């Protein structure tokens, strides 16, 4: 059990309550540094991006499929309503975009370490569509033997056992299921419906087919209580998924904001949310599930593991974000603009961020602190020719005073308390970095919701 005084320091100094919390994990985000990218200079930009990958042998591939049956209250990805015609156009655009990248030479002499289908709900697309995308990837670049290939999935799309078998047949070997909670009252508020038995059946089928599985859960949902969270964890113990990821509810969706304004009693009190996060992390640790803050191996989520290792990400689809160690860029958000540019044989990149050396150093710390081992001081010195203890001196002093970090002979890592509240530590690092850029800068949510409204 963590000392109560350490918990109070975190709670008092930088814990993000229900109204303040913004999801910035797993990566470092500097929206004020975005620069628009004109189609006329995209070819030159891609040459610069390829140069940033000159020493990289492996890549991660992300496929964004932003369609869903409906918009859930907790959703911060703002998906499009399922539409066969729109989805077919979008699907064909994805295939063309992958082909365009292949033609740039970016894939030459490289391998794909892991592939991830995110959304939205990727399984609103057929298995044939997903297979065609995977086939196009395999035709364009070598994929390492045994690579992790994950799709996110809505429980409703996995009710048919044959659908799951089909996913296995096309090469999907990991499925992440969005459950969020098993409390029927909360699910109703969130515009979701699934039963415990449905999820249990899905997990059983996935296990029978040797498909790794993860269940996504949330704390801080509208009307959630400590008792309902405890019940959720008891159910998870019975279902026994291979992995569980818990995240906090980020209040940015206008639907959620409207509900909270009409029913403010549904907002989880900050004291209760703090207790929920502590309970959840204690439970995760007891069950042997790895979470951000104490990753040790790639078994639970290989894609995330290599992301934190700064393996470059090449992302396809509207609003998809790609990374190298020195550049980040986004595709255009609207599916119409995205597909229109693809049809004109123009890469649909809308904006980019060149990361300064200082940005790169803070990102390196930000990502490595999400590992149990933490940041290697010798590796940092070798890469940047800088002493991390000097570069981050003042910030580390603050984090150490909050009992969040520990420094050994060769590592900066999170304490147990820091790992339990890793999201808040990461937000603190973001805030500190932004203040170095300008005292007027403020951290915004990673999601589009930041441009709309907040409670």
Image: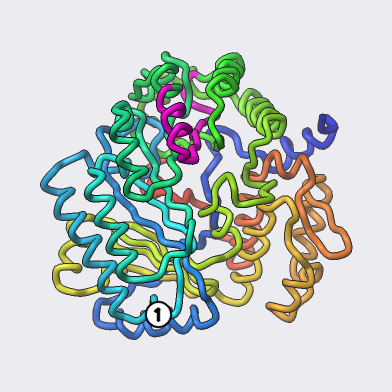
Q: Badge 1 local density, few (<14 within 10 Å), some, or many (20+)?
A: few
Taking the spot 82% from the left edge, 37% from the top edge, the residue there is: 6
Q: How far across and down, in percent of the image, does residue 303 sit?
A: 51, 54
Taking the spot 83% from the left edge, 53% from the top edge, the residue there is: 406
Q: Is residue 69 left or right of residue 361?
A: left
Q: Which residue is mark 1?
A: 108
User: Looking at this view, is 181 or 111 the one in front?
Assistant: 111
Q: Is residue 220 magenta?
A: yes
Q: Is residue 314 magenta?
A: no
Q: Which quadrant does the N terminus fall into?
A: top right
* 170 in relation to 441, above or below: above
Magenta segment boundaries in residue numbering = 201-223
Taking the spot 31% from the left edge, 73% from the top edge, the residue there is: 101
Give SS at disc 1: loop
Q: How far across and down, in percent of the image, does residue 273 sit?
A: 61, 27
Q: Is residue 132 left or right of residue 110?
A: left
The answer to whether any part of residue 4 appears in the image is yes
């Amino acid at each position: 059990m963590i000392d109560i005084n350490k918990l109070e320091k975190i709670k008092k100094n930088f814990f993000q309550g229900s109204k303040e919390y913004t999801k910035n994990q797993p990566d470092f985000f500097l929206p004020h540094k975005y620069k628009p990218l004109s189609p006329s200079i995209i070819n030159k930009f891609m040459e610069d991006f390829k140069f940033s990958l000159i020493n990289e042998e492996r890549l991660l591939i992300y496929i964004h499929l932003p369609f869903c049956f409906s918009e859930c209250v907790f959703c911060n990805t703002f998906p499009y309503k399922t539409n066969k015609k729109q989805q077919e156009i979008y699907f064909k655009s994805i295939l063309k975009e992958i082909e365009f990248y292949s033609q740039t030479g970016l894939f030459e002499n490289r391998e794909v370490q892991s592939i991830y289908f995110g959304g939205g709900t990727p399984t609103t697309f057929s298995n044939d569509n997903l297979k065609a995308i995977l086939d196009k990837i395999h035709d364009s670049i070598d994929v390492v033997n045994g690579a992790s290939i994950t799709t996110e999935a809505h429980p409703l799309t996995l009710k048919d056992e044959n659908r799951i078998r089909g996913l296995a047949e096309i090469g999907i070997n990991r499925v992440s299921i969005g459950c969020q909670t098993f409390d029927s009252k909360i699910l109703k508020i969130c515009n979701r419906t699934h039963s415990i038995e449905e999820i249990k059946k899905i997990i059983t089928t996935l296990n029978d087919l040797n498909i790794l599985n993860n269940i996504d859960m949330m704390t801080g949902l509208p009307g959630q209580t400590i008792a309902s969270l405890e019940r959720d964890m008891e159910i998870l113990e019975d279902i026994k998924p291979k992995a569980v990821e818990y995240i906090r509810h980020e209040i940015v969706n206008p639907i959620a904001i409207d509900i909270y304004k009409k029913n403010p009693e549904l907002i989880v009190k900050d004291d209760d949310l703090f207790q929920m996060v502590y309970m959840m992390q204690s439970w995760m640790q007891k069950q042997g599930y790895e979470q951000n803050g104490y990753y040790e191996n790639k078994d639970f989520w290989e894609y995330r593991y290599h992301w934190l290792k700064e393996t470059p990400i090449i992302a396809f689809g509207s609003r998809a974000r790609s990374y190298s160690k020195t550049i980040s860029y986004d595709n255009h958000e609207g599916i119409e603009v995205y597909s229109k540019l693809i049809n004109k044989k123009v890469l649909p990149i809308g904006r980019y961020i060149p990361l300064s050396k200082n940005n790169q150093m803070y990102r390196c710390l930000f990502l490595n602190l999400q590992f149990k081992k933490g940041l290697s001081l010798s590796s940092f010195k070798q890469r940047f020719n800088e002493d991390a203890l000097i570069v981050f001196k003042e910030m580390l002093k603050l984090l150490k005073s909050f009992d969040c970090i520990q420094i050994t002979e060769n590592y900066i890592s999170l304490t147990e308390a820091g790992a339990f509240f890793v999201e808040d530590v990461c937000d603190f690092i973001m805030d500190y970095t932004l203040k170095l850029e300008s005292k007027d800068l403020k951290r915004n949510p990673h999601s589009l919701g930041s441009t709309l409204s907040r409670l």
